[in-house]
Image: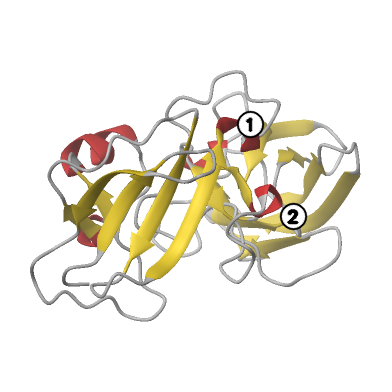
């Protein structure tokens, strides 16, 4: 990445370069599939966003002052060749978000067209609206269907013995922009917990349940149903459910 540059460009044609910054003077290598965060304030980012990889931060002084409403970004090689170019707009954010300040606009498919608004989406609320140095919360692979619900382990014992104490609930959706709810029901059909409620979820999200009900107490032993409901901007609703067994030892 030595002598690569990032530039602020006007949002309208003819595109005019307004400011340019060299990324580094060092022979810095970025591994295939790796991530790098360019920032003037790494500690501030880490305080603001709960999910990040601190080893992916590159402290760069005097980065271009990119406009949050609209603007252009140009990434160029040391030889001056354009590596990628984007003209963005805050209109690309999820339309049901009332506030977009502090919300990352994420690219969904690496192989998708840079300049397509359909390839960008607001970061998920479930990860704090940004994930510096990690896979984008709205990243998409080539997949179809209404989504998938995975539970691990399928039998868990919330007794704090260090083995299978927590249930992992893994949600996978085929598209971005879904609002999701996760609820847990006892053998009699009564809702006992709601780990996620009407939140903007990523395409691949993991949450946990520790076996504690809404009343603050451990639930009784038995078979429970993990139920999810999600919907997209077009009103398409997806509902999934799976059973999990809660064991109470001793």
Total numbered badges shown on the rendered structure: 2
Kindly identify the residue that appears in the image at 84 percent across and 52 percent down.
240
Among the 4 quarters of the image, the one containing residue 83 = bottom left
Kindly identify the residue that appears in the image at 31 percent across and 32 percent down.
48
Image location of residue 216, percent across then percent down: 54, 26
SS state under label 1 = helix
How busy is the neighbourhood of tag 2: few (under 14 within 10 Å), some, or many (20 plus)?
Answer: many
Viewport quadrant of the N terminus: bottom left
Image location of residue 68, percent across then percent down: 44, 30
Observer able to see residue 195: no
Among the 4 quarters of the image, the one containing residue 151 = bottom right
Circle 1 residue: 91
Residue sitting nearer the eye, 157 or 119: 119
Image location of residue 49, percent across then percent down: 35, 38
Observer able to see residue 68: yes
Among the 4 quarters of the image, the one containing residue 236 = top right
What residue occupies the far top of the structure in this picture? Answer: 98
How busy is the neighbourhood of tag 1: few (under 14 within 10 Å), some, or many (20 plus)?
Answer: few
Foreground mark, 2 or 1? 1
Kindly identify the residue that appears in the image at 16 percent across and 72 percent down.
2
Mark identifier at residue 175: 2
Residue sitting nearer the eye, 125 or 242: 125
What residue occupies the far left of the structure in this picture? Answer: 26
């Amino acid at each position: 990445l030595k002598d690569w540059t990032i530039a602020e460009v006007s949002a309208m044609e003819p595109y005019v370069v307004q400011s340019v910054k060299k990324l580094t003077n060092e022979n810095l290598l970025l591994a295939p599939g790796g991530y790098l965060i360019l920032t003037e304030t790494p500690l501030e980012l880490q305080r603001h966003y709960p999910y990040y990889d601190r080893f992916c931060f590159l402290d760069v002084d005097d980065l271009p002052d990119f406009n949050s409403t609209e603007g252009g970004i140009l990434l160029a090689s040391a030889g001056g060749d354009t590596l990628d170019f984007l003209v963005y707009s805050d209109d690309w954010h999820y339309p049901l978000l009332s506030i977009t300040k502090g919300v990352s606009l994420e690219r969904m498919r690496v192989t998708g067209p840079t300049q397509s608004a359909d390839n960008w989406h607001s970061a998920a609320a479930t990860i704090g609206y940004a994930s510096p140095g990690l896979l984008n919360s709205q990243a998409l692979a080539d997949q179809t269907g209404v989504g998938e619900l995975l539970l691990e382990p399928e039998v868990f014992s919330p007794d704090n013995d260090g083995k299978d104490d927590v249930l992992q609930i893994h949600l996978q959706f085929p598209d971005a922009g879904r609002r999701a709810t996760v609820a847990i029901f006892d053998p009699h059909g009564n809702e006992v917990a709601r780990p996620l409620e009407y939140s903007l979820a990523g395409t691949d999200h993991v949450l946990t349940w520790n076996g504690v009900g809404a009343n603050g107490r451990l639930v009784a032993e038995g078979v429970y149903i993990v139920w999810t409901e999600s919907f997209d901007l077009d009103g398409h609703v997806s509902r999934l459910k799976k059973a999990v067994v809660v064991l109470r030892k001793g």
